[in-house]
Amino acid sequence: MNKSQLVEHIAKNNDMSKTTAKRVVDSLVTTITQSLSEGDLVQLPGFGSFSLSYHPEKQGRNPQTGEEITIAGQNKVAFKAGSKLKSAMNE
C-alpha cells in the first residue's frame, strides 16, 4: 500500500474527503518525524513504538580500493511492533 492508497482507504472508511484524509496522514507523519528528531519516543498502543537509536562512528573499508574509512555516527529509527499488531500478523 502506498500513500495515495492509504489516503483513499482512510477517506472511504471515515466518510471524509481525500483532501482531509491526506492532511491527516501528512500531519501524522510530520508529528512522528518531529517528535523523533527531538529525541522523544512515539508510542501507539497496540500498534507499536518508534524510537531513535544512536550508532557511533566506526571504521569501514572502501570495497573498491581497500582503503580504510571512518563511517560517521548517526541516529537510526527503530520500530517495535505492539502486541495487537504482532497477534494480527500471526492469525
Image (tube, rainbow, N blue to C red):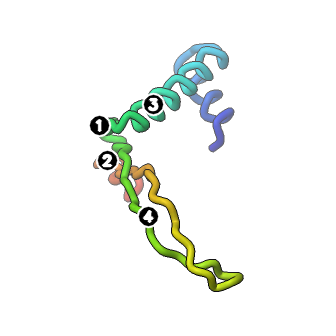
Q: Residue at x 40, y 32 (%)?
A: 35
Mark 2 touches mark 1? (CB < 8 Å): yes
Q: Vertical placement of 79 versus 19: above or below?
A: below
Q: CA distance from mark 2 to mark 1?
A: 7 Å
**Dot 4: what SS?**
loop
Q: What residue sits right under mark 3 in the picture?
A: 34
Q: Residue at x 40, y 50 (%)?
A: 79
Q: What residue sits right under mark 4 in the picture?
A: 57
Q: Nearer the viewer, mark 2 or mark 3?
A: 3
**Lower sequence index among marks 4 and 2:** 4
Q: CA distance from mark 3 to mark 4?
A: 24 Å
**Dot 2: what SS?**
loop
Q: CA distance from mark 4 to mark 2?
A: 30 Å
Neighbor class of circle 3 (other Cα within 10 Å; few <14, some 14-19, many 20+) is: few
Q: What residue sits right under mark 2 in the picture?
A: 82
Of the numbered discs in the image, which one, if any, rests on residue 45?
1
